Image (spheres, rainbow, N blue to C red):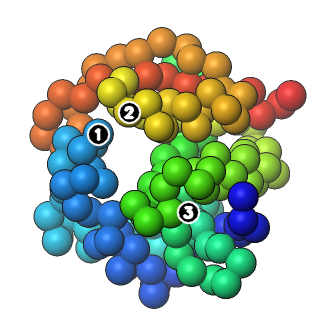
Amino acid sequence: MEALRLRIWSENDLELLHAANTPEMTAHLNGPETDDEILERHARYLRLVASGEARMFVIEDDEGAALGSIGHWHVVWREEPALETGWFVRPEAQGRGVASTALALLAEDARAHRGERRYLTAFPGVENPASNGVCRRNGFTQAGSLTMEFRGAELTVNEWALDLTT
């Protein structure tokens, strides 16, 4: 696996959200967002990073090419403060371990910035074997599954949790 690093999200990273907003890339997320929703997501990332409520990153290779994005943000999970993570990897970088390596780097960052939060959680769709495998390979425990509304439709996801205190 190539060397990767996580770089904090910046004003210049909007293009990465557009690149990930294709039917193929959003197949497990109930489809693409509108242009306005992409602009709002970018603004939200910048706002949450600035306030300290989230740490959103660009996944870069050793030459600085943006391969995808990953981050963690504050949530309440099972009535307990936690962090949630989500990610995407551009199609041309998939199948090379990028997501697994990025999640390992993110878990280190989450441990350093968790505060009182014990768990890092992830909620990949039950029909997304790649993302579920990334959780499994990174030591997350499957805690169940649930169906929720996401982007205007039902989405059934697996609940994964990583104990950040171990």
- Estimate the spatial distance between the alpha carbons at disc 2 and disc 3, rounded to whole Å: 22 Å
- Residue 90 visible in this rendered orientation of the protein: yes
Q: Residue at x 25, y 29 (%)?
A: 155
Residue at mark 1: 28
Quick check: 29 above or below 93? above
Q: Nearer the viewer, mark 1 or mark 3?
A: 1
- Residue 82 visible in this rendered orientation of the protein: no
Q: Nearer the viewer, residue 136 or 161?
A: 136
Residue 118's label in the rendered image is: none
Q: Residue at x 50, y 63 (%)?
A: 93
How far from the left and from the top, in percent, is residue 75?
51, 38
Kindly state the secondary structure of the residue where label 1 is placed.
helix
Kindly state the secondary structure of the residue where label 3 is placed.
strand
Question: What amino acid is labelled 3 in the image?
Answer: Met
Residue 115 lies left or right of residue 134; in this view the side is right
Quick check: 14 above or below 17? below
Residue 60 lies left or right of residue 104; in this view the side is left
Sequence-wise first label, 1 or 2: 1
Kindly state the secondary structure of the residue where label 2 is placed.
loop
Number of callouts in the render? 3
Q: Nearer the viewer, residue 125 or 46?
A: 125
Q: Residue at x 33, y 27 (%)?
A: 127
- Estimate the spatial distance between the alpha carbons at disc 1 and disc 2, rounded to whole Å: 6 Å
Specify the quadrant of the image occupied by residue 63: bottom right
How far from the left and from the top, in percent, is residue 9?
54, 73
Sequence-wise first label, 1 or 3: 1
Quadrant in which the N terminus appears: bottom right
Quick check: 114 above or below 59? above
Residue 128's label in the rendered image is: 2
Sequence-wise first label, 2 or 3: 3
Residue at mark 3: 56
How far from the left and from the top, in percent, is residue 92?
44, 65
